[in-house]
Image (cartoon, rainbow, N blue to C red):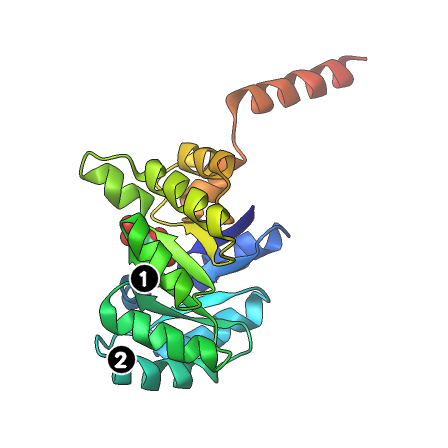
Amino acid sequence: MDLYIDTANLDEIKQANDLGVLDGVTTNPSLIAKEDVEFHAHMQAICKIVKGPVSAEVISTDTDGMLREGRELAKIADNIVIKLPCIVDGVRACKTLSDEGIRTNLTLCFQPVQALIVAKAGAFIVSPFIGRIDDIGEDGMNLIAQIRQIYDNYGYTTKILAASIRGTKHVVDAAILGADIATVPFNVIAKMLKHPLTDNGLKAFLEAWNKQ
Ligand code: E4P
């Protein structure tokens, strides 16, 4: 499974990239707004740090605006992926950009039929939002399972990216179900490398070694 970081913070991106296991980055308008930066210059800075796919989201809600923004964003770097919402205009923009060879990430996916349609429109990535589904008392992980089954039934190659990840269990469950990618906030990446038995075991090994 590929591991992306879900942030626009350069410091977090650098730290995660230094681990040597980071495959990409996802951003969204809320994450960019937190950084108080010029959007295009900031995306360029992220693309210089991480070689893998870096998602940059449009803010237009009509197809023409999405295409205009998407084509401009695509000029920033070869690894930019254009993030579009799973709405009618987003699907149209996805089809056009995909036909032009521009990779897309269809975001805010909350039901399997949205994933089916965006795969047919040539999306490179679909982003089901696990945490936000759990937040309303439903089972976000079931959406991953349903999309995996549908894509496997018909051989769609659109990558399933588990988004809106809240904790390490989401990462484990998404991996077991065969999500292609998980995009994980920095604090959750840190938790993926933390276990008290690892820390206690290491401490005991070193104490024993030093007593020799
Ligand atoms: C995905 O690409 C989104 O940026 C992100 O995962 C949204 O997560 P949230 O529900 O924590 O805002």
Q: Is residue 54 above or below residue 2?
A: below
Residue 150 x, y percent position in the rendering: 42, 47
Name the amino acid type tagged 2: Thr
Q: Is mark 2 within 8 Å of ligand 1?
A: no
Q: Residues within 10 Å of mark 2 (few under 14, many from 20)?
A: some
Residue 98 x, y percent position in the rendering: 45, 75
- Between 131 and 87, the residue placed more toward the observer is 87
Q: Is residue 127 above or below residue 193?
A: below
Q: Name the residue: 34% across, 36% down.
A: 142
Residue 88 x, y percent position in the rendering: 24, 69
Locate the C terminus and report the quarter of the image it occupies.
top right
Q: Is mark 1 within 8 Å of ligand 1?
A: yes
Q: Secondary structure at mark 2?
A: helix
- Between 38 and 144, the residue placed more toward the observer is 144
Name the amino acid type tagged 1: Leu
Label 1 vs label 2, nearer the camera:
2
Report the number of discs.
Answer: 2
The answer to whether the residue labelled 1 contacts the one labelled 2, judged by CB atoms less than 8 Å apart, is no
Residue at mark 2: 63
Q: Name the residue: 40% across, 64% down.
A: 120
Q: Residue 31's mark?
A: 1
Res 68 → quadrant = bottom left
Q: Secondary structure at mark 1?
A: helix
